[in-house]
Image (spheres, helix red, strand yellow):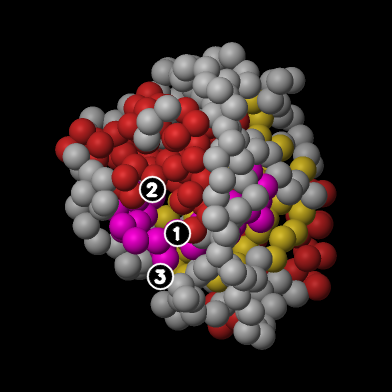
């Protein structure tokens, strides 16, 4: 079958891994303070975020084979209709300012726990690649188990809410995402400010594609390979060396948005970056995770490894 096959091996992973007894996310309505569902801990209410972030000149992208053909796009439309609800997918090679291809009707939504990855990178940047032992523990819990209390602690290490938002925006800008405004204010009581950041699939795709190009990203990416078993749906079902992070939570009406971003190793030793999201037909978390798994498997069968350009971090 034409398509992608996940190969064993690490994607440039190195460094050290912190160990800690992990507080795993629970299913909706059974979550603890460490989940990325509706029990996200609150952080203190800040003043509005208004940092200025510099931009990097856009590169001219070399001509390349289309990752998704017209037939692929038609196939995804059929898949979305079959699943019900709304779904979306953004895909590209790994690198800075890649050519992003997008399909599906769902194009944007709040970040939920996917924003924990750029928060982790901002902490790594602040520590110049040498986080303290306590920070390593927090990073491990926040990425591998989506622990919200750990993420709030990391956020607080970045300074005031405005300063933390500016630091995370700086990380996003380095990957080419200069449009996302990291939320520093509590918008919904009971939920973190940063989890309510509005993050489009295209903007998120630029971040995940550029993540391997960032200095000191090896630890965070290695943690993204160690996500706990009960969160290994969607992209996490594609193999043990897939680097990914999910996020999920209910909207004001109680219906769930479930999303992921990740990097998939290909048989030709290249890598594919992808961002996927769904608002399932029945609004449930369980249906959302099942739909993302089907979307991830669809991706495996519809993008040729030979059509994916090599990583470009220039």
Determine the secondary structure under disc 3: loop
Determine the secondary structure under disc 2: helix
Q: Magenta residues?
A: 199-224
The residue depicted at 59 percent of the width and 55 percent of the height is 177
Residue 188 is at least partly visible in this image:
yes
Mark 1 touches mark 2? (CB < 8 Å): yes
Instruction: Give the answer, above or below, for where 267 lies relative to 289.
Output: below
Q: Main secondary structure of the magenta part?
A: helix
Residue tagged 3: 7
Foreground: disc 3 or disc 2: 2
Mark 1 or mark 3: whose residue is earlier in sequence: 3
Q: Callout 2 environment at 10 Å: few (<14), some (14 to 19), or many (20+)?
A: many
Residue tagged 2: 121
Q: Position of residue 87 (x, y in %)?
A: 73, 47
The residue depicted at 66 percent of the width and 66 percent of the height is 100
Alpha carbon distance from label 1 to label 3? 20 Å
Residue tagged 1: 211
Residue 290 is at least partly visible in this image:
no
The residue depicted at 33 percent of the width and 49 percent of the height is 125
Q: Callout 1 environment at 10 Å: few (<14), some (14 to 19), or many (20+)?
A: many
Question: Which residue is more in the foreground, 312 or 304?
Answer: 312
Q: Position of residue 73 (x, y in %)?
A: 78, 65
- In the picture, measured across the screen, residue 158 lies left or right of residue 307, that is left
Q: Quadrant of residue 102?
A: bottom right
The residue depicted at 81 percent of the width and 57 percent of the height is 77
- In the picture, measured across the screen, residue 215 lies left or right of residue 77, that is left
Alpha carbon distance from label 1 to label 2? 9 Å
Q: Quadrant of residue 228?
A: top left
Question: Which residue is more in the foreground, 177 or 41?
Answer: 177
């Amino acid at each position: 079958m034409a398509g992608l096959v996940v190969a064993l091996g690490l994607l440039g992973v190195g460094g050290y891994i912190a160990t800690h007894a992990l507080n795993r996310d629970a299913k909706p309505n059974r979550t603890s303070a460490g989940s990325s569902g509706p029990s996200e801990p609150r952080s203190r209410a800040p003043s509005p975020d208004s940092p200025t972030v510099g931009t990097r000149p856009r590169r001219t992208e070399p001509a390349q084979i289309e990752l998704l053909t017209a037939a692929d796009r038609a196939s995804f439309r059929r898949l979305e209709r079959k699943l019900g609800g709304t779904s979306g997918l953004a895909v590209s090679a790994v690198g800075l300012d890649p050519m992003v291809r997008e399909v599906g009707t769902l194009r944007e939504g709040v970040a939920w726990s996917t924003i924990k990855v750029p928060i982790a990178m901002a902490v790594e940047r602040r520590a110049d690649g040498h986080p303290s032992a306590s920070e390593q523990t927090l990073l491990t819990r926040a990425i591998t188990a989506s622990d919200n209390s750990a993420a709030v602690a990391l956020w607080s290490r970045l300074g005031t809410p405005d300063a933390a938002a500016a630091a995370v925006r700086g990380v996003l800008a380095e990957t080419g995402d200069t449009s996302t405004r990291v939320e520093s204010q509590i918008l919904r009581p009971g939920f973190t400010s940063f989890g309510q950041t509005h993050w489009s699939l295209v903007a998120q795709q630029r971040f995940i594609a550029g993540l391997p190009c960032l200095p000191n990203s090896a630890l965070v990416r290695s943690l993204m390979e160690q996500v706990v078993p009960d969160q290994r749906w969607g992209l996490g079902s594609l193999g043990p060396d897939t680097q990914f992070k999910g996020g999920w939570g209910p909207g004001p009406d109680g219906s769930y948005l479930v999303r992921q971003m990740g990097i998939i190793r290909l048989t030709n030793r290249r890598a594919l970056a992808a961002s996927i999201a769904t608002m399932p037909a029945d609004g449930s978390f369980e249906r959302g995770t099942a739909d993302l798994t089907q979307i991830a498997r669809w991706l495996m069968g519809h993008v040729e490894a030979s059509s994916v350009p090599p990583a470009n971090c220039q």
